[in-house]
Image: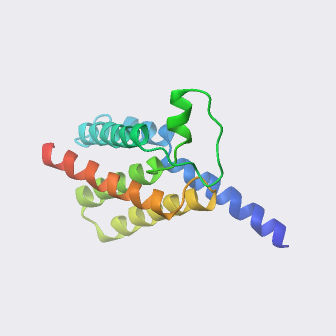
Amino acid sequence: MNKIVQKQLHEFFRDVTALGGFAASLLIILLFISSSLLFPLVAGSVITAVLVIIIRIFYFKPRPKKEEYTSFLEKIDASAFPSLHAARMVFLALLFGVHYANAYLTVLFTTVAALVSYSRIYLKKHDWWDVGGGIIVGIIAYLLTSSVF
């Protein structure tokens, strides 16, 4: 029974973590293509990715479950700090929470961001510091985006 629960939990967090990935971000942008949120979504996504990449270029921190790399781009991807998934989800939670100004939706967005962030730790892609760094990057991306749009 314990192995079944562990397998289901692993599959749950593997699926949840996909919500913070590039494909999910692109899908969200496409869903809002004719919305006033399009430009903030695109700008925030770009800012989030650029900030994470710049940090990873200058500061390499191996993931808890180390990944091998043979090129510069693979090294950036193998770096754990900060978590891009956490940064994306915090940015989205802030953007949607403020835009829709609905307590229930804000709780939903915050819960999803927290689940995605925790999934990165559970799957041994990041530790708490990496996720914390991602949260800060997500907040910065939101603040930069909200000051322009």
Tell me: residue 90, above or below residue 102: above
Considering the image in quadrants, where does the N terminus appear? bottom right
- Tell me if 91 is positioned left or right of 111 in this view: left
Disc tally is 0
Residue 11, horizontal then vertical, whole percent: 69, 56
Where residue 38 sits in the image (x, y, percent)?
Answer: 28, 38
Q: Is residue 2 left or right of residue 117?
A: right
Give the residue furthest to the top: 71
Report the residue at 64% width, 47% height from top.
66
Q: Is residue 147 above or below residue 29?
A: below
Q: Outermost residue, right direction?
A: 1
The residue under the point 29% across, 42% down is 44
- Residue 78 location, quadrant: top right
Viewer-side residue, 11 vs 73: 73
Choose between 52 and 99: the one closer to the eye.
52
Q: Position of residue 76 (x, y in %)?
A: 49, 36
Q: Quadrant of the C terminus?
A: top left
Where residue 132 sits: x, y (%)?
Answer: 41, 61
Determine which quarter of the picture holds residue 86. bottom left
> Residue drawn 38% across and 39% down?
49
Residue located at (44% from left, 47% from top) = 84
Q: How is the image coloured?
A: rainbow
Q: Quadrant of residue 119?
A: bottom right
- In the image, residue 137 above or below residue 36: below
